[in-house]
């Protein structure tokens, strides 16, 4: 091979490396990354909602909060939400202070907040459940997140696609070098992510129309599961 042919081959190989990322090739082996992506529809909504109550005494604030939370729990049961899908995630009792110049802070009241995490399996009822909770006294909504209840099938398919992508990259890189991809030497999963397209929002009940029968909610059509692998192949 003359100098010009060698320079051209080196240039083509360098171009391929740049196009495919940080793949490495060395005597007897090649290391490549593969990426697999799967899109699928959600089947679960997770809602965090609660009640914030303020009163002059801690007891009055707690009593008011408890009544609203009991109403919400009854409504959730009436909407078909099972007990196992409702969980208390936070409870706070906080004094409300008035700061005065050159004087110690004065406690003027108390705030009680209680937060529930609710799993909704019927996505068509998400807005209805939210509105029912508001009507029952819910006035603090923290987040609404859509996901897949059992993503194992999507994960498995994403891993398979990631390996296939790694094989394709290795074969494409070695094709102009008159080398063949052999058996895998090492396989490592370097990244896994599942994006449930969160819809974060902070809402108060009075921000919604009182005459509404359901909060307008639009679930995402597809969720994305991504897996990346690093595979080291022997060269033949």
Image (tube, helix red, strand yellow):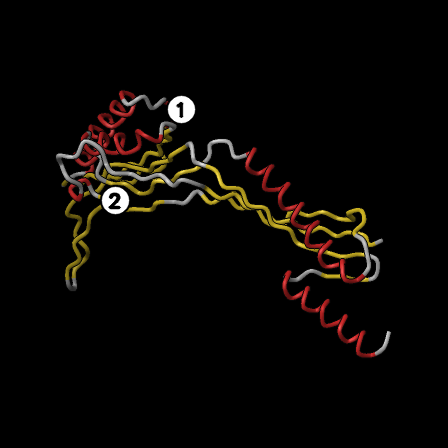
Q: In this rendering, which labeled residue sits more in front, label 1 or label 2?
A: 1
Secondary structure under the numbered disc 2 in the rendered image: strand
The answer to which of 184 and 46 lies nearer the viewer is 184
The residue identified by callout 2 is 94
Query: Left or right: where does residue 148 sit relative to residue 80?
Result: right
Disc assigned to residue 163: none
Q: CA distance from mark 1 to mark 2?
A: 29 Å
Rendering quarter of residue 32: bottom right
> How many labels sit on residues?
2
Task: Give the residue drawn at x 84%, y 58%.
Answer: 28
Is the residue 92 above or below the residue 24 in the image? Answer: above
User: Do callouts 1 and 2 mark residues in contact (Cβ within 8 Å)?
Assistant: no
Q: Residue at x 16, y 64 (%)?
A: 102
Residue 22 against residue 89 in the figure, above or below: below
- Choose top left, top right, bottom left or bottom right for residue 17: bottom right
* Mark sitting earlier along the chain (1/2): 1
Crowding around mark 2 (Cα neighbors within 10 Å: few <14, some 14 to 19, many 20+) is few
Residue drawn at x 68%, y 54% is: 169
Q: Residue furthest bottom?
A: 3
Q: Give coordinates of residue 98: x percent, y percent.
A: 16, 54
- Residue 173, position as x, y percentages in the image: 72, 59
Which numbered circle lies on residue 84?
Answer: 1
Say what secondary structure mark 1 lies in.
helix
Within-10-Å neighbours for mark 1: few <14, some 14–19, many 20+: few
Image check: 25 left or right of 21?
Answer: right
Quadrant containing the N terminus is bottom right
Horizontal side of 226 relative to 213 (left or right) equals right
The image shows residue 11 at horizontal and vertical percentages of: 72, 72
Image coordinates of residue 214 in percent, x first then y, are: 22, 33
């Amino acid at each position: 091979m003359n100098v010009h042919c060698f320079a051209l081959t080196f240039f083509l190989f360098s171009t391929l490396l740049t196009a495919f990322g940080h793949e490495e090739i060395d005597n007897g082996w090649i290391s490549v990354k593969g990426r697999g992506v799967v899109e699928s529809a959600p089947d679960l909504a997770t809602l965090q909602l609660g009640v914030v109550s303020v009163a002059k005494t801690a007891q009055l604030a707690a009593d008011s909060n408890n009544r609203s939370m009991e109403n919400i729990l009854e409504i959730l049961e009436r909407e078909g939400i099972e007990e196992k899908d409702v969980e208390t995630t936070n409870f706070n009792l906080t004094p409300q202070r008035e700061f005065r110049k050159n004087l110690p802070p004065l406690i003027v009241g108390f705030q009680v907040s209680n937060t529930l995490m609710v799993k909704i399996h019927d996505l068509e009822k998400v807005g209805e459940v939210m509105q029912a909770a508001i009507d029952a006294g819910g006035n603090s909504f923290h987040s609404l997140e859509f996901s897949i209840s059992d993503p194992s099938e999507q994960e498995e398919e994403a891993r398979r696609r990631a390996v296939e992508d790694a094989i394709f990259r290795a074969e494409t890189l070695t094709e102009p070098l008159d080398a063949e991809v052999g058996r895998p030497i090492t396989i490592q999963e370097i990244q896994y992510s599942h994006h449930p397209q969160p819809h974060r929002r902070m809402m108060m009940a009075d921000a919604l129309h009182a005459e509404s029968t359901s909060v307008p909610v639009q679930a995402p059509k597809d969720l994305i599961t991504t897996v990346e692998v690093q595979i080291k192949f022997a060269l033949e």
